[in-house]
Amino acid sequence: MSPQEYVIETRSLGKHFGRKRALDALDLAIPRGGVHAIVGANGAGKSTLFRILLGFMPPTTGEARILGRNSQQLRPEDRGRIGFVNEEHTLPVWMRVAELTAMQSRHYSNWNQAGFDQVIGHYRLLPDQRVGELSRGERAGLNLALALAQSPELLVLDEPTLGLDVVAKRAFLESLLYREAASECTVIYCSHQMEEIERVADNLIILEQGQLRHMSAPDDFRARVSHWVADIPFAGPPTASVPGLLQWQRIDGLQHYLVLDQDEGFAEFLRASGARSIQSMPVSLDRAVNGVLSRDHAAPPPAV
Amino acid sequence: MWDLFKAELQRFRFWCLAYASLHLLILGFLTRVVDLAQQPLLVYRSIAAVYALSGLLFGLYQLGNYRRSNTWLQLLHRPLPHWRIAVALAAASVLLLLIAVALPVLVIAIWQKTMTARVVDLRHWLLPVSAILIATSAYLAAGYAVLGGRRFAISGLILLGLLLASDAAGFGALLIQLLALLWLAALLMLAFKPDLSASPRSPLALIAVALPLQMAIYCALVMVCFGVELLWIMQGSHPNNSTPPAGGFVEANKAAPADLLSAGLAVSARSEAALWQEQIALSEVFQVFREFERLPQRHSLSNLSPMEFDDNERGERWVFSHDRMRFRGYRLSDGKGVGEMGATTANAEFTTPALPIGSLPGFAKDDALLMTANGLYQYQARSRTTLPRFQLPSAERFAATPSLVGESIAILSDRALYIVDGRSVSENEDLIAPRLSIPLPGAIGNLTRIDLIELVDGYLISFTYTSTAHNARVDPYQEIVQVHDDGATEPVARRVLAMDYPTWHRYELWWLSPAMHSLYQGATQLFVADSPLLRIDKPAVPLSMRWLAATLAVLSMSLVLLLSRGLVLTRSRRLAWAAAAALIGLPALISFWLLHGGKERG
C-alpha cells in the first residue's frame, strides 16, 4: 500500500512529558476508507496522538503524517480536508444555530448543505436557538452535522458520545451510520464505549501506554480472545505458566481463564494441569479489549 | 475571517454597550463637576490605568477562554490561515474597545466643544486616540501573556510599563503608544498558532520575543535589588532611615539650612569664614529648590498642573489653549465665553505654553503670575491684559517658580540664580531686570537645594549637588560662593560629600546589564524633546564596576554555552545566544533559560 493510501501514518512517534511517555515510538498506518476505532485506557496516548496529528502539539521524536502531509506543516487547505469533533463539543455558545451554520458553510468550499440537513434532521433544533441553549446531545449532533457537512476526507471523532445519555448516544450514532457522506470519508473513532465500536468500526486499533497493541477487524480481535472455565482441584497451575493469560479468576471453585491467541492446545494444558472438566466460550468485544488492556494495568502491590 | 469578526462582535456586544454607557455616564458626571480637559497628570494617569486594566481583563477573558485545549483546536482547525483568525479576533476586539473606551471620551470632547466655552484643543481630540492605543496595547499584552509561552509571555507587560516610564509628550507619547501596540501585536501574532508551545523560529521573531523579555528580566533584577534595599531599611542601618553618615550626601539633604551652610563653611580657607559662621547663626537662611524637570510642552496630552486661573473679581476663568497659544476666558456664572488673551497688550501668542503659578508680593488682588519656558508674565486683572515682567536669556529655562528671599525674589533657571528686587514688582509694570545673576556651579539636574543668607554686601550662597547621587548620576558635593552687590562672585568653599552607599549599590542599575540600562534610557527618552533641566554631570563608571559587569557577561556567556549543550539548537543560534549573553549579560542568560530551558533535550 503506497503512503498516499494511508490517511494517518506515524513512524517512531514519541511524545514525552518530563519522564512520562505519552507516545512511545508509535508506528501506525491507517488505510484510507472505513471506520477505524482507536481504543485504549486513559493515558494511552489517544488525545496526544490526535493533537500531534492536527499540528497542535509537536512530537518529541519521530514523525506523523496526516493525509500525506507532515502534521507539523499542515496548511489551511489541509485542515479543510480534516473534520474534527471533540468530546466537549466546543462550539461558540453565543451564536445561533443558523449563524454558526452559515459561518461554517462559508469557511468550507465543499460544504454539503443537504448532508447537513440530513444529519441535523435527527435532532429537533431551531435555527434561532443559541448553541449555549442546546442540550449536550443536541450540541453533539450539531457538531457532527457541521463536521460531516464539510465533506472531509478524514473525520476524527474523539470520544464524541462522552457524557451523552442513551437516547442522545443512539441519535448520534444513527446520524453517523446512516449518513451518506460518512461513507465517503475515512472516520477515526475514538471511544471507550465498546458497543458503539462494535456497531460502527471496520477496524480496531488498540493503544496501550503509547504503543500500538493491536490492529485488525473487531471480530478478528474478538476471535483471538477466549474464555476457558476449568474445574481444577486445589490451586491450579501457577498464573505465570498459563500461556497467553489476560485474566484469571476463581469463582465458585472453578478457574476462569481469559487468554489470548490460544487454540485447542490450551485445553491440553488445562488437562495437564489437572482439570477434570473444561469449557471454552467466546467473549464480547468489550470483555476482550478489557482483558487486553487490564493485563498490564497498574495496580497497587498485593498486601503482605 | 469576516464571519469570525462578526461573531466576536456579537459575542461581546452587550458587555461592550454596557461598559460604554457606564463609561459615558461617569465621564458625563465628572465633566459637569470639573473640566476634564484641565486635570493634573495624576488624573490622566489614573484614567489611563482604568482603560489599560479594562483592555487587560478583556484580553485575559476572551483569549483565556479560547486557550483551553479543545476550544483552541476548534477555533484554529479550519481552512483559514491562523494569522487571519488572529486578525479577525483582534480587529473585533479593537472595535469593541473603540466603542467602550474611546467613543465616550470623544462624545464628551464633542459635548465640551459644542456646548461649553471650555477649551478643547487638538491635544484633547487626541485623548480618545491615546485611550484606544493604551486599551488595545493592554488587550494585546494580555493576549500574548495567555497564548505565549507560560515561562516568558508575561514579559509583554513590560511594553505597557514603557507607556508609564516614557517621558514623551504629545505626538511623541502617541508614537510610543503606537510603537508598543505594534510590538505587542507582533508578539500576539507570533503566539497565535496551533502549537502554543512552539518557540519563535525566525531570528527576527526571536528578537521580538527576547528583547522585551530581557528588559522585563532587567527590571525584575532591579526590583530584586530594591527588595534587598527594603531588607536593609527593615534592618535599620540604611542611611535614609537612620542617623545619616556624617559628611555624606544624605546628611546634606536632610540638614537644617543653617547647619548645611555652616558645614560647608567649615572647609573654607577664607579668612571671613569664622565671621560668616556667626552671621549664619543670627541670620534667616533662605532656601530655593529645583522644581521642574520638564516644562509644559505644546500639544502635550496631559498637564503638569491645570493650566487655568480664576479672576474672582470678574468671576472669570482663564484657560490656556495650546492651539491658540493664548488664554481663553469664560464666565464662571453662566459659562459664556469672554474672549482671548495673549501675551502683552498686543494679544500676541505666547512662545511656549503659559502655566499659571500663583502670584507675587506686590501684585493686585486678582492678578496672577504666568510662566512660559523663559518668561514671566503678570496677568493684570484691572486691565485684563498680560504684562511681560521677567525674561530669561533665550536659551535658558525656568527650573523653579520664583521664591522670596527677604525683600528680593530668587528666580532659578537651568544656568543661573537670579535675584530681583521685590519692590520693582509693585512699583512699575515694566520688565524687571535682575539685580544679581549668579551662574550655577554645577548641572541643574544634580541640584538639590540652594541655601543662602544676606550679607552686608551681597549673599552667601550654598549650592548642594546631590540629586540622584544614590544611583551614581553625580559625585555629590556642596559649593559655597559669595556674591557681592556689584555682581562679582567669589568661591568660598567646595565640600566633597561622602557617597553613603556602597559603590555596587549606586551602580546596580548599570552593572546588572550596561546594555539593558542604555536601552532603558533610550526607550524612555525616545521621541522626547531634549530638556536642559535634566542636564547632569554624570561621573565615569569606576573600573571595579566595569570589571563586575564584564565578569557577569563572561559568566552569562559561559552558562549559555553550557546550558545549550544537548538542546536542539542550530550552531548559529547557539552562537547568537552566546554573543547576546556576552553583550547583555544576566538578562540574556535568564531569557535563554526561560525560552529554551523547558524544552525537551535532543
Image: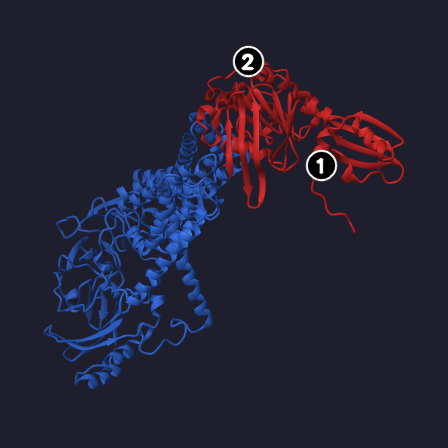
Chain colours: A red, B blue
Report whether A29 appears left or right of A276: left
Q: Quadrant of residue B400?
A: bottom left
Which label number is shown at residue A294?
Answer: 1
Task: Please state which amino acid type lies under the numbered disc 2.
Answer: Ala
Q: Are marks 1 and 2 on the same chain?
A: yes
Please tell me whether mark 1 sits on a helix, a strand or a loop.
helix
Task: Kindly identify which residue carries mark 2.
Answer: A114
> From this viewpoint, is residue B423 visible?
yes
Farthest residue in the left direction? B486
Report whether B295 appears left or right of B189: left
Q: Position of residue B413 (x, y in %)?
A: 19, 63
Q: Position of residue A191 (x, y in %)?
A: 65, 29
Query: Number of callouts in the render?
Result: 2
Question: Please, is residue B394 above or below residue A206 in the view?
Answer: below
Q: Position of residue B479 (x, y in %)?
A: 21, 74
Q: Position of residue A239 (x, y in %)?
A: 78, 39
- Chain letter of mark 1 equals A
Task: Please state which amino acid type lies under the numbered disc 1.
Answer: Ser
Question: Please, is residue B41 above or below residue B105 in the view?
Answer: below
Tell us which disc is closer to us: 1 or 2: 1
Please name whichever residue, A143 or B73, is drawn nearer the observer in this view of the structure. B73
N-terminal-most mark, 1 or 2: 2
Q: Quadrant of residue B98?
A: top left
